Image (cartoon, rainbow, N blue to C red):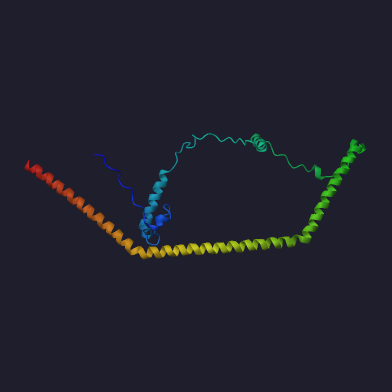
Amino acid sequence: MVQSPPPPAAPTTCPLLLESRALIDALGYVDTELEAPAARAAVQQLIRAEMASFAPPSGGYLAFLPDYAPAFAGRPRLQNEFKRVAAGVALDAIDLHRYTVCAPTGKSARDAESWEAAVKQMQIQYEHQSNRVMNLELQQAYGANVWKAKAAVLDGLNAQYAHKLAATKAASEAVNVQRKQDQERNAPKLQSYSRKYLDLLDKTFSIKRACENEERRAAKKVRVES
């Protein structure tokens, strides 16, 4: 006779599981067993034993992994820099020659092109210094106001984040208060269920022990009668 498959399990009516099956609320306000020093010591001992079992082998436990060889595909500058560092070649210092203006000397002193290049370099430096002076004057005239505006923006952002933080803390506190009230309200019922569970375990063990005694007595009686 072919048996029909068992009927599907009835859907849960637990509000907590209906809200999210991945969310299992802890009973931190009711389960106080870990507050006992002996329980804490036992838990720490179990944790240390479990951590000791995770110790990697002493001899090359990463040997099965291949050596890492960065390719930097599509990034020629990174490739060149990686090759330079691997070869031990020092990084080229910043060329400061273009920031100096020197008059041609020696044979170049009679070369018109050398003087033209020197004049051009001087004009470039003069323009650069002029730009620096103008930027410093603008900074002196308007820099304070710019930083004040920046500070005002940062103050506004800080106030917004402070408000959000206070709201988040208030919501978190409300959740914790609700959890505490729910757990403390149901604590007597949970404790009663726990005591009943332990009593049933004790009765089950007593019945099992009595059954074993009866089996041994019956077996002994059979041997005597035979």
The residue lying at 80 percent from left, 53 percent from top is 132
Horizontally, residue 151 falls left or right of residue 13, namely: right
Q: Residue furthest left?
A: 225
Q: Position of residue 216 (x, y in %)?
A: 15, 46
Quadrant hosting residue 183: bottom left
Quadrant hosting residue 159: bottom right
Q: Is residue 26 visible?
A: no
Q: Is residue 124 visible?
A: yes
Q: Eyeballing the image, is 60 above or below 143? A: above
Q: Position of residue 68 (x, y in %)?
A: 56, 36
Horizontally, residue 203 falls left or right of residue 173, namely: left
Q: Position of residue 209 (x, y in %)?
A: 20, 50
Q: Quadrant of the C terminus?
A: top left
The residue lying at 30 percent from left, 59 percent from top is 193
Q: Quadrant of the N terminus?
A: top left
Horizontally, residue 94 falls left or right of residue 71, namely: right
Q: Position of residue 77 (x, y in %)?
A: 68, 37
Q: Eyeballing the image, is 165 above or below 69? A: below
Q: Nearer the viewer, residue 51 or 15?
A: 15
Q: Nearer the viewer, residue 131 or 159?
A: 159
The residue lying at 88 percent from left, 38 percent from top is 114
